[in-house]
Amino acid sequence: MITSGHLLSINDLTRDGAFEVLDTARELSRITDGAIKKLPTLRGRTVVNLFFEDSTRTRLSFEAAAKRLSADVINFSAKGSSVSKGESLKDTAQTLEAMGAELVIVRHGSSGAAARLAQSGWIKSHVVNAGDGMHEHPTQALLDAYTIREHFPEHDRDFTGLRIGIVGDILHSRVARSNALLLTSLGAQVVLIAPPTLIPIGVSSWPVEISYDLDAEIESLDAIMMLRVQSERMNDAFFPSEREYARGYGLGAERVNAMKERAIIMHPGPMNRGLEISASSADSERSVILEQVSNGVLVRMAVLYLLMGGTAIPTEGVLV
Amino acid sequence: MSVVLDQSEIDRSLKRIAHEIIERNHGLDSVILLGIPTRGVTLAQRIGSFLAQIDTQVPVGSLDITMYRDDLRLRPPRPLVPTQIPAEGLEGKNLVLVDDVLFSGRTIRAALDAIGELGRPKTVQLAVLIDRGHRELPIRADYVGKNIPTNARESVRVQLREIDSLDQVEVTL
Amino acid sequence: MSSSDIVLKEVRLADSEVVDVEIRGGIISAISTKITSDLPTLDGRGVLLLPGLVDLHTHLREPGKESSETVLSGSQAAVKGGYTAVSAMANTTPVADTAGVVEQVARLGAKAGLCDVFPIGAVTVGLLGEQLAELSAMADSAAGVRIFSDDGRCVSDPLLMRRALEYVKSFNGVIAQHAQDPILTAGAQMNEGAVSSRLGLQGWPAIAEESIIARDILLANYVQSRLHICHLTTKGGVEIVRWAKSQGMAVTAEVTPHHLLLTEDLAEGYDPIYKVNPPLRTQEDVEALREGLADGTIDIVATDHAPHPAEDKDCEWNSAAFGMTGLETAFSVVNTVMVQSGKMDWETLVERMSAKPAEIGGYKDHGRIAVGSLANLILVDPTKQWKVDRSKMLSRSYNTPFHDLTFTGEVLHTFYRGVHVMRDGQLTGLKHE
């Protein structure tokens, strides 16, 4: 159970709570595998997608999850809205709540924006963090854990013994932060692999290993997670050139061949084919990138269900 | 607290329900049992074994109705439990839903919604161990182990040895 | 307002001596163990008489941002906090980079009439760091500016900084540097370290401050000018200043009350009330700052009082303004952290919060208690406990990081030029705008 009523960070979940989300998602997968495509669970309830950053895939995934639970979905994107005219996060959120939103899914470029929404007394809604700045993206980590678990059934209740590499722009990555927290809490060993310029200061306090050498790690990994490299990082001199980056940290055929027999290749998308991952690696049999997408919907359904059950916002009228 | 059914009475009730199911459906050709978790599944399995003793084996499955409840706002979310639909499916079957206690009828309404998504059985019948009254919906059971008139504030506690290590039904205030 | 001629009876001075003090015609007219006079008296038993506090780093926001603070409301907050002189930073709109603007600020201060308001002039035109402002004109103006600062921005161009340091020598001015390498801190939001990495907030490394401090100390020494370093926040910065002083270099440094108490961990909840420039640092830095203030490496406490309207703090961290108010809490914070804890005595507090800042700024009428000098004085209860309530602040803004915290020591009375401007914690003749 997510006791705070929000999912802002992986820290909101205990290990048991994380497994509860994963178990619920798995059960939802069984239910929705067959004839049932839509459950009436959240009928008549309103969920808002509040996206201050463009992210079509995350927004669509949350939207699909909410709709499969029969919730009404309001999509709000900052582009072309009053936000671009200077309306504040607070005013936007209060406006949407006044329209009946009970749960706000927020994507924002500012770290902590989801926490501010949930904890400043601005609104009473549940808040789900769909990515805040360089901080966290908890549902991405949950869907990654779900995907890993499906491929390693012997680790169903404990990831101890699994070694998972996260490769690339750790410094700016909310996906890396959430995954480092979640996967280690489930028992896995996480190794962050990047050039030193893309490793955050103070990372020694994280429960992870650090490596600058992908080739030294590749043979020991059960799963490798390739992070998207933004081209502006090159302009900011985090690395000298795309070619040099791809040579050191890109996942090409040779590295794929060095991987363990059952090892899987993951990517949160969208991919830069040819930069952090070659086309052949992305399309190889080891790649579970499309599974991640489907699992994303299941995990998000589970999160919506677990957050919205039993904790309706009190209203003047009688609950139906 | 008072015990309203003991082990032998529970056995007798379930055996009687098994006979009634055979009688009502003129045999067991297209009968399947679906228990509603948690104790409804155990009861369905027990009825299934009585049916096998008396006549023949029928498919027994389970149906989690959590996601179909209309009172999600009022209670904390429950962990989902597996739904197992027998391989034959529900199409054209005489489906017997099995639950432990029939009270408001909302669980059964949710189950009917779920079934509607899963297929189109020929008939849907309802078997319960206890009918305690206080219905809020036009729903009745086809097979009842025992009718127990209760006060709405009382609670009926069904214990089954597979789960609770003894067979007993008690009413407490 | 006319002078409140009065005799303060049996007040204790910072050096523990108990005396009677007579104020007549705005001047301290007598100090003696027993004064017999027909003037009204104030029972000073149990309280301390200190020279009025002097702030070298105050943002009064006028002209330009009167919704956050005005010279008048800032003066009221100053009096409440025991300040008889404040120094108005130059980052107003328009920027205080001409004689006209600094004279306007000085006039507004005189009109408010609650404490001395000394304008600080900008080092560069528009704070843009490109071209020296007319420093002499501001020095020669009616405002008589002696401190120059681009505070809020660093004079990062080393050649421009060298020229500024050289130029102010002709009128004994001082450059107050906001030490922050702008390139190392582009987009920075909080102290760089484990906490910023975990929170995903862009880091503000200590070295971005320390490298500028080191550079400017060397520059100032090279051109034999005076350098004042604003709001020191890091252990490394303290060590560099300590080294410079050991070499006899003419550098002074300040620390804010908030950097003496608060740490980066407060960013944990993303509440921008704790967002400040320079950022809150680590506990290790806080300890080093306390030690530096106690041993004199850091010369003075300055508030960096930075009022902001509610909407600039009631938002997400990255969008929020940097800054905290401080005038009304500075004395109590320093008393609690430094004096009550035994790190500093009363005389040292007077030195750090009144005498030395007055000396650096050249504010002759402040910083001492002596017969014949202007009666800029405060009476404080050193042991009274009180809880900060932001809604009771006299500042126009409520962005104090100390809300709901309890401190020891409260300013009860403030005399400005002999006028009893605050009596028993209440401003007298409080003007409503």
Image (tube, rainbow, N blue to C red):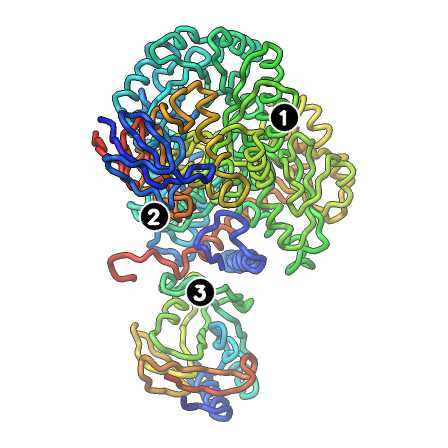
Crowd tier of the residue under label 1, counting other residues whose Cα lies within 10 Å: few below 14, some 14–19, many 20 or above: some
Instruction: Decide if residue C111 is on the left or right side of residue C366.
Output: left
* Near-viewer residue (C41 or B40): C41
Instruction: Name the image quarter holding the C terminus of chain A.
Output: bottom left
Q: Which residue is mark 2?
A: A101
Task: Kindly identify the amino acid type of the residue bearing the numbered disc 3.
Answer: Thr
Q: Do the dots labelled 2 and 1 sit on one chain?
A: no
Query: Which quarter of the figure has residue A247?
Result: top right
Q: Which type of secondary structure does the marked residue at label 3 adopt?
A: helix
* Near-viewer residue (A257 or A156): A156
Labelled disc at residue C240: 1
Q: In the picture shown, does residue A61 fall above or below C118?
A: below
Task: Kindly identify the amino acid type of the residue bearing the numbered disc 2.
Answer: Ala
Residue B94, given in percent of the width and then of the height, sits at: 44, 74
| Residue A227 visible somewhere in the drawing | yes
Residue B10, given in percent of the width and then of the height, sits at: 48, 89
Q: Which residue is mark 3?
A: B66
Question: Mark 2 belongs to which subunit?
Answer: A
Q: Residue at x 40, y 51 (%)?
A: A126
Question: Mark 3 belongs to which subunit?
Answer: B
Labelled disc at residue C162: none
Residue A40, given in percent of the width and then of the height, sits at: 39, 58
Q: In the picture shown, does residue C173 fall above or below A251?
A: above
